[in-house]
């Protein structure tokens, strides 16, 4: 049976994520919660271009314990805003697990997440793609293998993105390099998102490059995270943990036979 | 005390490697073995541009048990040719460990290596750089994490390199992709060596790119391999094993705290 | 006053192009011609998500001299298929100029285009973006400046694109290199489109790289071509000519003062 | 008959340049001028690894009108330092043309160059490679063709290069972008030199990338410049002019036939 999913947020990213969730046969999108509901458009399925009526919209202030009882889900995926953390306690009480991919939280919102994670399993990651998290771990391992390498991070995004990419800052944090000196931000045209870590040695360079083609990548990442979280006990998790767990397991499987 | 090293081969790559070995304070280059000795140039140090007299040349046919007894080394690093395997039994009997970075061996030569590896520790790898071997392992792990990704290998080398790069073939072998279909060879100008593995998903691509700046990279790789082999028991090892061992250890050290 | 435009085709690319045309204040999209009309969806504006009623659909078999008389346009932009060339004579008789961006034509279709171009101005280019055509010309000039350079073309596209990219073949044709030997096709994931020309010299490489972010690029290219064609006399033109004309003009404007 | 060349400077770059000049059959390296002469090493040919005795060294203070009379050259190529401008008047009086590739000049040195250029032909360019100068011109033309594009320059060099690359600054100057905001300097390992200009549009990006493989590129560029200057009248020239002249000529040769 498919895992029942509720989605918070239906903006620029949320709607793309909804499309990914709907197209995943292991998941079933039960409802989509958004700030205000247009009476002429009450099903997410219609907004996504489907003919059928499924995945109804529900307004944020209607997401009550009663609603959840009548419309139960196993997982809620949150692409709305930090304010949705106000609902986390209600969700946790109903036994719903939560995947959140919000970029930034206030300390108060973070406290709400921590509190809810005592009662349910929550996975919180600003960047929810497998690719970026693999990059994070592979970079850290490479740094430990060639500790003398110089490291620079280059991130490219569309012209209007004002601040430094959160993923680039996280990479810098993990690699223990000063983001003011070693993160280079390129802002041009409509670039969706590109992150590059350069490792320089006297006689060789190694680059790890991640390029986003579209925001749909967040949807498949969230779907993956939801499935991973499905059986997990209460607690706070991150996408890096998910990938790290996989990483450890896969590295162990490798065997290198010098005779080959 | 420095590890005592003997070098086989002083051609285009061998001489660059010698320079790296001499500049490594943990190693001491005792002698360099080459096919024929020019009577006017009897020290590798002179050929490398040093004023001092050290690292004398010795001809291949003078590398006898007696010579080794008088000029003992802990490790021999071999950048000569497959024919040098004829010396491996003598070296093994003298308790010398061997690092060999020859691209291709005949079955007969491989048999000689295996036989010698019963008596001493031998590390054999056509590509001896840390970077390429990290790339090999990181690629395999990534493939296991995103098994649905399409994978292509692109390798770029100088115009006159005729065959497909051995490293690219090895990457294809490890990633279980058909080299005839998925290894793309670009031959232009004087490119020293570039290898790229592209992982393509519907909404993102990840690339691992290794670029060689000069052949000196082989020297630092061989130096690293020599130090690693110094304490190892008899047997046949590969650079991938060295890096895999490091990789495993480093991945274990990583900890991901979701609260950070 | 805005240039009046008619669009042929409303498929995957056509609909994206329509969006670009509608958002260009110098153009006015009068109607969109498609194979069959859904009676519930008679305005392209609705299909594009606008509330207003504009840019009505018209079926191919309704695109008669009478229709054009009542719904006059200055330019027709064609993103449908080779079959639409059957309409070109009618369009030419009505004094309508034509921009066509179809990838491949049969000899019969090409004959129809040539015939119509005796009566009106037609611009025909399989790749209608300014970027790709600049790349075409800049590559040819570079080849003439460094004639000894080795040249390779690398093109990357989504996994399901079966044939070699037409743009890559055209690049090879212009650069006079054998596409079987020097065009390298990489097929991975969901890559929209990437073309790279590598020039290799013994001591340096130069690369020109064009990456498509979305199909909207065809829309802005077609809009540009339409404006360029607006005042042109009868005849057959290409996007390369447009860019070449600009190129020549701009190169002449450059002045290099050695004292700066 | 070969063009007779004198070389000023025999440091890290000068010696590599000398090798390129010697291997060019259209040139004949008559002598090499350096600060101090080692009495044991009086021929550049020996320092370059040749057996024969040719291209003798001459000390800077011995480069007198008498020396030039006895050892005439057509062209002097200068890879020494700004101080060598003190010799330019002497060279100009002897009818010698000058190619100089010094990165930075003081205003006084620039005045000496200008003065000498009244009597002889001088080509002065901090970056003497064809590739970089093609990049300069092609970038300017592209900017004029797509004036709305965002432009960023990325330059990568070895870790110890402290200042921003002069070539990157010149690119920024030509493209009229603020180098403080739009030139990104990456310093890692032993990267010889890489310059990239990124043009970003909403739906596409174009990149021009130049990579140096070794300093020998300066030698072939200087050789090219010397031949170009050989017949030129008095005056001050730049490598950009040379390439611009070629560029203009080659663009004119191109013809675009829409029927192909």
Image (tube, coloured by chain):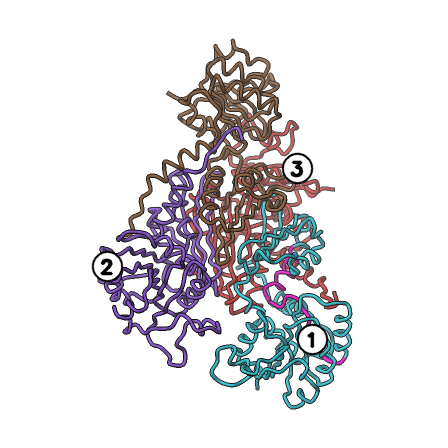
Chain colours: A cyan, B red, C purple, D brown
The single residue placed furthest to the front in the displayed view is: C1
Local packing at callout 3 (Cα closer than 10 Å; few below 14, some 14-19, many 20+) is few
Which label sits on residue B70? Answer: 3
Residue at the spot of label 1: A84
Residue A247 seen in the figure: yes
Residue A154, image x, y percentages: 61, 53
Q: Chain of mark 1?
A: A
> Could you confirm whether marks 2 and 3 are on the same chain?
no
Q: Are marks 1 and 2 in contact (CB under 8 Å)?
A: no
Q: Quadrant of residue C8?
A: bottom left
Q: Quadrant of residue B117?
A: bottom right
> Could you confirm whether marks 1 and 2 are on the same chain?
no
Q: Nearer the viewer, residue C192 or C164?
A: C192
Give the distance between the C-alpha atoms of the residues marked 2 and 3, in whole angstroms: 92 Å
| Mark 3, secondary structure of its residue | helix
| Mark 1, secondary structure of its residue | helix
Q: Chain of mark 2?
A: C
Give the distance between the C-alpha atoms of the residues marked 1 and 2, in whole angstroms: 61 Å
| Mark 2, secondary structure of its residue | helix
Q: Chain of mark 3?
A: B
Q: Which residues are magenta?
A: A119-142
Residue beneath the point at 52% across and 18% down:
D116
Residue at the spot of label 2: C116
Left or right of C5: which side holds A50?
A: right
Q: Comparing marks 1 and 3, which lies closer to the viewer?
A: 1
Residue D168, image x, y percentages: 57, 40
Q: Nearer the viewer, residue B213 or A193?
A: A193
Residue D136, image x, y percentages: 49, 40
């Amino acid at each position: 049976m498919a895992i029942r999913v509720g989605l918070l947020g239906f903006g620029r990213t949320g709607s793309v994520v909804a499309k990914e969730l709907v197209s995943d046969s292991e998941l079933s999108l039960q409802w989509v919660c958004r700030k205000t509901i247009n009476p002429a458009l009450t099903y997410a399925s219609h907004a996504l271009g489907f003919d059928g009526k499924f995945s109804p919209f529900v307004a944020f202030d209607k997401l009550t314990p009663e609603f959840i009882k009548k419309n139960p889900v196993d997982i809620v995926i949150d692409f709305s805003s930090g304010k949705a953390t106000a609902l986390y306690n209600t969700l946790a009480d109903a036994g719903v697990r939560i995947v959140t991919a919000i970029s930034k939280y206030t300390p108060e919102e973070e406290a709400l997440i921590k509190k809810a994670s005592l009662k349910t399993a929550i996975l919180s990651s600003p960047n929810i793609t497998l690719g970026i998290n693999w990059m994070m771990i592979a970079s850290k391992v490479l740094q430990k293998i060639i500790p003398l390498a110089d490291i620079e991070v280059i991130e490219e995004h569309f012209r209007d993105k004002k601040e430094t990419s959160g993923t680039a800052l996280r990479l810098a944090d993990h690699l223990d390099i000063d983001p003011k000196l070693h993160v280079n931000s390129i802002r041009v045209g409509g670039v969706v998102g590109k992150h590059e870590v350069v490792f320089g040695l006297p006689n060789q360079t190694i680059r790890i490059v991640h390029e986003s083609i579209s925001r749909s990548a967040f949807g498949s990442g969230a779907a993956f995270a939801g499935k991973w979280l499905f059986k997990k006990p209460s607690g706070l998790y991150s996408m890096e943990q998910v990938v790290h767990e996989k990483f450890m397991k896969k590295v162990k499987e490798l065997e290198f036979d010098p005779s080959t």
